[in-house]
Amino acid sequence: MIHDRPGSPDELRADLSVGVRWTGGIQFEAGAGPDRPLLMIDGSSKAGQSPPETLLCALATCVAVDVVLILEKRRTPPSALEMRVTAERSAGSPRRLVKAHLAFSVRGSAIDRGEAERAVRLSVTKYCTVRDTLDPEMPVYWSLELNAE
């Protein structure tokens, strides 16, 4: 925020780029390109996810990608992975995220609990780009259910 200011796209290396199109009200379509699926984002959370919900989805899927890849490298690929993400927001404006919890449910016949816990910890604390982009002072907690314990 202290560095936010008007500027030009020429001031950065364009590693990522997305487009956003207003569709009316406080609804938008967003996506990375014309041949890729669009996200419906709705400021009122009626026709699509709100921007903060979309941010939580980005956090969850970023962490989940790393968990899957780490488990696959250990030759113990998951057969299923689901997450429920909950977050606490500040009372004042802006209503920023102040805490998040990632509840993992992982299934896989060969997955060792210690390896699954390690995969989650490494993803959240070391590899997830989205987590690393969020405020480092914001705590992210996690829990793991393995093979429907």
Image (cartoon, rainbow, N blue to C red):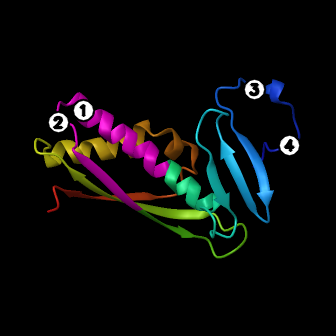
Residue 50, image quadrant: bottom right
Residue under circle 4? Answer: 5
Q: How far apart are marks 3 and 2 (CA)?
A: 40 Å
What's drawn in magenta, residue-wise?
59-84
Residue labelled with disc 3: 12
Q: Is 61 drawn above or below residue 11 in the view shown? A: below
- Tag 2: Cα neighbours inside 10 Å, few (<14), some, or many (≥20)? some
Q: Distance between the residues labelled 3 and 4?
A: 14 Å
Picture coordinates of residue 72 (x, y %)?
24, 32
- Residue ID for mark 2: 76
Tell me if label 2 and label 4 are in contact, CB under 8 Å: no
Q: Are marks 1 and 2 in contact (CB under 8 Å)?
A: yes
Front label number (3 vs 2): 2
* Of pointers 2 and 4, the one earlier in the residue sequence: 4
Estimate how packed mark 4 is, as few (under 14), some (14 to 19) or many (20 or more) residues with alpha carbons within 10 Å.
few
Residue that label 1 marks: 72
